[in-house]
Image (spheres, rainbow, N blue to C red):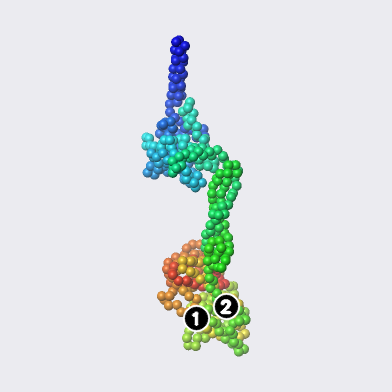
Amino acid sequence: MDKIKKCLGLLVCIAITMIGVPSLAYSQISVTVNGSQVQFDQPPIAENGRTLVPVRAIFEAMGCEVEWNDGVVSVYRNGQKVMELTIGSDIMYLWDRGEQLIYKLDVPAKTEGGRTLVPARAVGEGLGADVSWDGYTGTVKIYYDPDYYSNYGDYDYYDYYDNDYDDYDYDCRHTSTRQVCSIDLRSWKQTGSSATHQTVDVMEEVCNDCGETIRTYNERRTEAHVFVNGVCRDCGYEKEEKVTVKHPSSGSLDIKDDGNFKLLTLQSGESFTVTNDTEKTFTIQILNDGVKKRYHYVKYNKDGDVTATGYYSNTYSTISLPAKAVLALYNSEDSEIQIKAPSDVFFPVDEEAFEIKQIKPGASCRVENTGKKNIKICVLSKTTGTIKSKEKAKYDYVSYDADGNVKATKFKTTTQALSVYSKGSISISNSSDETIYVFCPARAAEIN
């Protein structure tokens, strides 16, 4: 009997000791991050065996930013959203390299003393930290490496939709990785150039140790189209139809020469270029037989700069060409025109007068002025023939100077002639339901 009493007394003493030590060891719960104590204006509290801490203080101590909006707490690291909690909800959302995970909390976030409190272990491990409890000092100890790749640590991932837990172990630090290209997920995007498209390969970074896919990212590069029957085999881009100017070679021009004058017959849509190689000005004549003929022309000086441009011109029946200058002329009539010039100086060369770009409805192009002076381009609804007012091309454009500054913007305009600044550019978008055509001096501009 005495032995029983002695045993009971010993057990009571042990129980009193076990109950009393913790209550005497600390007066309130404290939290440290990497050994430094976190200061709170609202003390942490214990609830259902879990320690809840003020949300802003704990996350800012771990180098994160916090946003609070109508009961929803969002946590960001390096500008990327990594966690979301809702007051009163036992669900915590995590984002790791674009993948959303759902973590079921033992204790939901709550408000206390005007502050939002969250479970320390759950949120700490959700950011990839090691969390431990020192029962003797009443301290939650968090060890956190902000450079550690993962957004999460070791915990039971809760499958919200299947209503069960999957135990994931993320002890691997993924120190050795390899890059794998998912060829089957390749996609293409048109770059704006008619010659190239952008290839996007979906790449995966895979851990060599555990085989886990660490992240998925896109690797982009620009590649040339490979056309098969006018369609790129990779991206499906349809080859644009380039307008062919019926520019005859100098040897095949329809020229009659009587020894004094040459008579050039130029068919509809044909063009020619001629250079004055002499030291004097000479004049050519556009014959009209009483009816003025329309044509496009551009003149260059000896330095290659544009000095004059005319579209659908019928004002001049004669054109003077100074010494060493160049004239390029395009027949915009539906019928032929005839040009008369002195035999000893008129020698047309095999070079097109204008570059012509066909722009389908909804498509666009960009004209770059490569010369030292402003030039004029023309936007038309057809390449030859008279264009009535209601038939004018309708388009949008933005004009830029040499420094890339926007100088003018217009929408659904029908203006036929546009100026392009020296070394500047102009972007044109077809806002009509019909194909339009952009003419620009072949020697002074480029169309993309």
* SS for callout 1: loop
Amino acid bearing label 1: Glu
- Which sits earlier in the primary sequence, circle 2 or circle 1? 2
Q: Which x, y percent locates residue 68? A: 40, 43
Residues 328 and 438: in front is 438
Residue position for label 1: 333
The residue lying at 54 percent from left, 54 percent from top is 185
**Category of crowding for the residue at label 2, using alpha-carbon neighbours closer than 10 angstroms: few (below 14), some (14–19), many (at least 20):** many
Q: Position of residue 75 (x, y in %)?
A: 45, 43
Image height of 42 relative to 96, above or below: above
- Say which element carries label 2: loop
Give the spatial CA distance, label 2 vs label 1.
15 Å
Quadrant for residue 86, please give it: top left
Check the image and report above or below for 338 versus 226. Answer: below
Q: Whole-percent x and y of residue 261?
A: 59, 87
Q: Residue at x 46, y 31 (%)?
A: 30
Is the N terminus in the top left, top right, bottom left or bottom right quadrant? top left
Marking on residue 247: 2
Report crowding for label 1: few under 14, some 14 to 19, many 20 or more residues within 10 A (C-alpha).
Answer: many
Residue type pointed to by label 2? His
Name the one closer to the observer, 372 or 45. Answer: 45
Q: Position of residue 368 (x, y in %)?
A: 53, 67
Identify the residue at image location x=54%, y=85%. 338
Of residues 164 and 267, the one drawn nearer to the viewer in this rendering:
164
The outermost residue toward the top is: 2
Residue situated furthest bottom in the rendering: 258
In the image, what residue occupies the spot 43% across and 31% down? 49
- Residue 6, compared with residue 48, is above or below; it is above
Answer left or right for 124 relative to 346.
left
Residue 391 in which image quadrant: bottom left
Counting the numbered discs, the total is 2
